[in-house]
Amino acid sequence: MNNNLNQRNDIINHPYVIFALGFFSIAVVIYIIYIYAFSGKPKQGYTYYSDDLLKMDNLFTETVSNVDDCQKLCEEQPRCTGITYESDNNTCIGQEYGRLRTDKDNYYAWVKPTTTHTLLNSSDKRLKSGKAITGYLKSDTSATLKTSSIPIPPLIDQFSFSFWLVIQDWYSNFSYWRHIFHKGTPIDSSKNRQFKTLVYYNWEKLNNDLPEQVIGAWLTPFQNNLRIAITTTSQRPYNRVYPHAHIKTCKCDKTGSGCNCWTTDQTGDPQHSSDALLDKKEFTHTEYLDIQDISSSIPNHIVISVKGNVMTVYLNSKEHKSIVLKGKPKWNNGDLYIHNPKSYQGILQDFKYFPSSLELDLIKTLYNDGKNHIASH
């Protein structure tokens, strides 16, 4: 009993312990108030911009009706951590990284709670290695994701893209190749930060101007088909086909007395030897597959999984089409461009990248996780 009294006296005789406990309690209360004030609802008289205002790179800039609509835009974007809304002109600016600053009363700031802006929300932990690119993006909004934000796959020929696509009007920009996204060849922008318009009637011209696509997704000009493009490399141009390869052949003079014989497609083959320099060169090609008759007005879940020289496309959790690539997939250091006009009319949602190939069970998980919250308008 005396020991208990002594312990209580020790606490009383050391006020710094009481001060420390009190300071900690006050800090907890302040933190709770901060979370409620700044994360629960928009706060008037504040902005949420990048740390370096001179290098501010907005995640999105939209015109909305009110601050609640601005907050909703951020909630639908996995990469968005907070917004600034200016009531004078109804401008909504989203940021991936930023901090709060005091400002005029016509500004409102909202910071997404840390518990909600995790990298990927999924019921399967194996999908946590993915990168969330965009949550909800209408086709009239262009976006760019810097390549530094996209993890390089450990195995350079194994990666995947997953997204939901809603085609609302197939006749929008009819007769053009309509851009959904591509990672690779840069698209120059003008001084007013508007993206260059991509006007292509034929695939050959498009392929010539945008030779690097890993991956590229396009809607075809005249049909409701989706083209998935991928850049590959090989040691031999694809048009060098030897229908008579590895067959012994001879060239004889008219009398038949003198013959020169060899095995085709070997070192001694005149056809092969004449192109010896080509055999030492690396050739780049754009390969693709087409998904025909994509349904319109309803969400379609599409996964593109690359594993070695095989590219497989899954549609609504089922394997839809697969091709064996003639070359090796060529990963590039280009940015990821989304919805550069001319584009389609619709919505791209829940767009994710994975630095690995995905198997069917994980694809079904992605489909089941997304189907209940994907919008069709």
Image (spheres, helix red, strand yellow):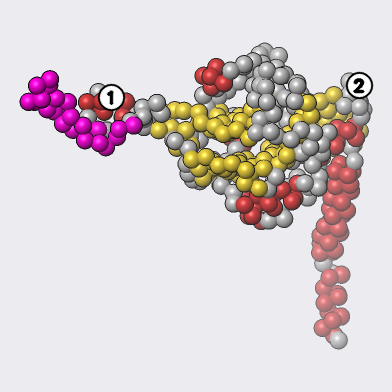
Look at mark 2 in the image and give the residue it sits on: 88
Front-most of residues 267 and 37? 267
**Disc 1: CA contacts within 10 A as few (<14), some (14-19) or many (>=20):** few
Q: Residue 275 carries which label?
A: 1
Sort mark 2 into few (<14), some (14-19) or many (20+) by Cα contacts within 10 Å: few
Query: For residue 183, which quarter of the picture?
Result: top right
Q: Who comes first in sequence, dot 1 or dot 2?
A: 2
Does 344 lie within the magenta span?
Answer: no
Instruction: Give left or right: position of 151 versus 279.
Output: right
Residue 245 position in % (x across, y down): 29, 34
Instruction: State which quarter of the image contains the C terminus.
Output: top right
Q: What stretch is highlighted in magenta?
A: 243-264
Where's residue 98, x and y in %?
Answer: 74, 35
Q: Which residue is drawn at 66% across and 21% down?
A: 221
Q: Is residue 352 visible to the viewer in this orientation of the structure?
A: no
Q: Is residue 250 left or right of residue 21?
A: left
Residue 249 drawn in magenta: yes
Rendering coords of residue 334 (x, y %): 55, 29
Residue at screen point 68% across, 51% down: 364
Quarter of the picture holding the N terminus? bottom right
- The residue type indicated by label 1 comes to Asp
* Residue type at numbered disc 2: Asp
Assign a secondary structure to mark 2: loop
